[in-house]
Structure formats: C-alpha cells, structure tokens
Amino acid sequence: MGTPTTQIVGIVNITADSFSDGGQYLDPQAAIAHAQTLITQGADWLDLGAESSNPDGEAVSAAQEIARLTPVIEALAPQKVQIAVDTCKAEVMAHALALGAGMINDITALSDPESVEVLKTYRVPVVLMFARNRLPRAEKRMGDPGTVLAEVEAFFGERIEQLLQAGLSEDQLILDPGMGYFLGSNPEPSLMVLSALTKLRRFGQPLYLCVSRKSFIGTLLGGRSVHERGSGTLAAEIWCYLAGVDYLRTHAPAPLRDAVAVLGAIRDFQLHPV
C-alpha cells in the first residue's frame, strides 16, 4: 500500500490560460504567495509552469517563459524549496536550472536533442511524459483504451533506451504515463492506465502522475466543472498513492497530505498493533 516516500508536487501555473487557474498567478508576487501556501499545505516540490499545455492554450516563447519564471525561482530558491520546472524548451530548462531548479518536467519527453544536452550538463531528475500527441500541447480527440497500455509501454521502452544511449543516467529518469486529454478526450484511456499502474513498474523507474482536476474526472462525475472535481481528484490520487506512485502532482496538497497521513497511520497500526 503506497509508499512513505511518495512526494507531493504542488502546481504553480504562471500562465494566462491554464485550464484550472489561468491568469490567477501570472503576477510574480501572486505566484510566489501561492507557492508558499502550497508548501504550507504539505507540498514537497513545487512545479512551476509558464506555458499551458491545454488544447486551447497559446504558444509562449522561451523569452516569455523565462521572464515569467525568473522572479518566482529567484524568490523561492533561497528558501531551499524543491523546484521543478514544466517546460519543453532547452533554453528555459538551462536558465531555470542555473537559477536553482532541481527537476525538469517535459511533456514531450526531451524530444528536443538540445534538451538532452542540458540534462547531461545538470544531471537533475527529468519527468518523461507519454502523450498520444507528441506536440507540446494536449489534443481533444478520442483515445482507444484497448491499445493505450501497449502504446505507453512501447514508448517508455524505446525512450529510456534512447536517452541512456545519449548519455543520461538511469537515476535521472522519471516516467509519467499522461492523463486526461494527453491520452484521449474520453475517460476510458485514463481509467485503463490507472487500473494498470503496476505494469509500469517493470521499467524500474519512479512513477509521476497528475490526475488533479482532469477532464476525465469531470466526465465521470456527470460533467462537473473544473472547481467541482475536488473529491473525484482526491479519490484518484489516493488510488495512485496506494499503487505506489512516487510523485503526485496536484493543485491541492492539503487534502492529499491528510489522506496520506491517515493511510500511513492505518498501515503502521496494522504492522504494529497495540
């Protein structure tokens, strides 16, 4: 059941158009305050993103990403906060890592060879995400639940081998099988992957997942809006925790932290009853 080492990753969207909170934290001071709140609520890491990956998101230049990220990283890094940066641009990765970020989260799985060179230089962990669409943005199209697991496994098998041959080390690689629109606009592909998370353990790499407020949760709950998906999100996150997912990326660390604490207390009592 789960693992005491599961890390909670709090989401800070420094964007104008993220599906959940676009525009709320575009101001650097608002982003910094939100980041500090997430740490208080129990986040082990902060995931800073300056370009939305939702299907309707606008393209953001590397210069824009850097301008949005810089004041936030500069404020948080001296506080010894663990910072991940969500980007697929090599220039942004290098800049963020030089400022003190300690992880990269790339939804294109380092598809740019220059990004691989950055990770060879800095040797920090990198999240490699699977998506049916290999562009840096999700798509609104139906996915096939019957083939999704084979696609995910084939992708990771090939990508891990490619990156090791390119010079990255095994202990850098973290696997994210994607969720929501990255797998399909229908919920079944996401449900298929969630139901079979243990199969991805065969690669021997840590698993990273984000189900927070995703479209498939809204669909399963009869069309709930983004901000009515909290309970459904927590249920899916608990499922991931119980499956041993190593990193859980979430908009709301507090409920997840509480759930993990209670589950841990039950487990400890089971192992060491009074």
Image (tube, rainbow, N blue to C red):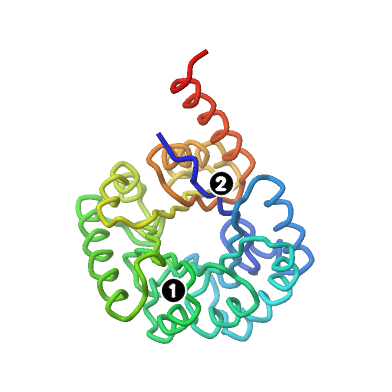
Q: Residue at x 38, y 65 (%)?
A: 173
Residue 23 drawn at (x, y percent)? 68, 65
Q: Residue at x 47, y 76 (%)?
A: 88
- State the separation of the CA atoms marked 1 and 2: 24 Å
Along the polypeptide, which appears first: circle 1 or circle 2? 1
Q: Which mark is residue 173?
A: none
Furthest-top residue in this view: 274
User: Which quadrant of the structure image shows residue 63?
Assistant: bottom right
The residue identified by callout 2 is 225
Q: Residue at x 24, y 53 (%)?
A: 149
Is disc 2 surrounded by few (<14), some (14 to 19) or many (20+) residues within 10 Å? some
Furthest-right residue in this view: 29
Three-letter code for the amino acid on which mark 2 is drawn = Ser
Residue 91, above or below 10:
below
* Viewer-proximal residue among 69 and 136: 69
The residue identified by callout 1 is 136
Q: Residue at x 69, y 62 (%)?
A: 80
User: Which quadrant of the structure image shows residue 228?
Assistant: top right
* Viewer-proximal residue among 8 and 30: 8
Residue 145 drawn at (x, y percent)? 25, 50
Three-letter code for the amino acid on which mark 1 is drawn = Pro
Label 1 or label 2, whichever lies nearer to me, is 1
Label 2 secondary element: loop
Label 1 secondary element: loop
Residue 123, above or below 257:
below
User: Which quadrant of the structure image shows residue 98?
Assistant: bottom right
Residue 56 drawn at (x, y percent)? 51, 68
Relative side of 85 to 245, left or right: right
